[in-house]
Amino acid sequence: MTRKTGTGKYEQMLEMCKNMKPIPTAVAHPCEESALAGAIEAAERGIIVPILVGPRDKIAATAKSAGIDLSDYQIVDAPHSNASAAKAVELVRTAQAELLMKGSLHTDELMAAVVSREGGLRTARRISHVFVMDVPTYHKVLIVTDGAINIFPTLEDKADICQNAIDLAISLNIKKPKVAILAAVEAIYTRNDLDLLLSSPISAWRILVVRSSAMILSASFTAGQPPIDAHSSLAAHPHQWHHTPCRPCVVRNLEPQHHQQKYSRPAPLGDCTKPHRR
């Protein structure tokens, strides 16, 4: 399973790993051919020692279909993807593994186990996601962060996100990483701003993140009440979809009378008729 990709930067990273000791790695739910093959290829290259976590029969069937021999690898049985994620995180938490590798489960299933307050892998620093990109016209890898986890980071969160990326860059042998910061808004929000936003007397507000044309992830909060289920339908909560304030108004604790009833969905952030600084 040897292949050449991109401009050779990927192969350079693999070369760096040759003299390193393989790292015990919990592979969560490797029940599709690409997920299982990736873990086994990393093991054959001496990068990891995989611990395959998931339904034993399903992993064995996937290996048989792909022609992969699993006789030298440990399998930890787990009945389904959520249990696989929880068990893989537990192996890392109890030092039976040092790395966590995503298999063929959804990212939100894995992340729910990772950020769990009871048995997760939380630290003092904010967790973040990075893309490591091989751009043919650039002489080294580029790291883009955060593209998957933090949808509304505060100033403090952004500092952690930057530091995480810097630490990763250094581990990839980039001696002096350069950081370019790109933001979609000019305003800076701290944790105090977010606390004020969450405690606002305004009846309701929503943050919407469109991940694809077919999926909208939403978080809905009402003052003094627990969060509404993110899967709640428009029909179930029609009153939540009116008088939606824009972010600056919420942070400044302004009432939303100037938002008209005409909206059939929440007003986009910044779509506000009230005169104020943006």
Image (cartoon, rainbow, N blue to C red):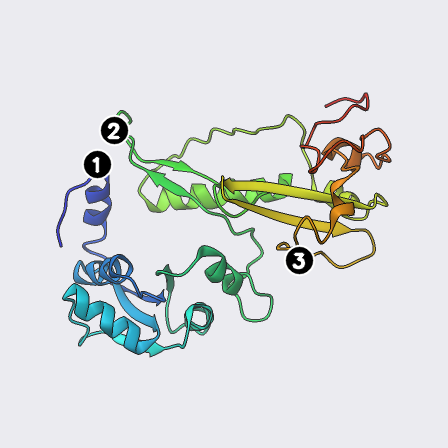
Q: Residue at x 74, y 47 (%)?
A: 238
Single out the mark in the foreground, 1 or 3: 3
Residue 10: x %, y % from top left: 23, 42
Which quarter of the image is occupied by the N terminus?
bottom left
For badge 2, the amino acid type reads Pro
Does the residue at mark 1 contact the one at mark 2 (Cβ under 8 Å)? Answer: yes
Residue at which label 2 appears: 136
Q: Is residue 203 above or below residue 100?
A: above
Residue 58: x %, y % from top left: 29, 73
Q: Residue at x 45, y 74 (%)?
A: 94
Residue at which label 1 appears: 6
| Residue 265 visible, this orientation | yes
Element type at marker 2?
loop
For badge 1, the amino acid type reads Gly
In terms of image quadrants, where is residue 12? Answer: top left
Residue at which label 3 appears: 229
In terms of image quadrants, where is residue 28? Answer: bottom left
Q: CA distance from mark 3 to mark 2?
A: 44 Å
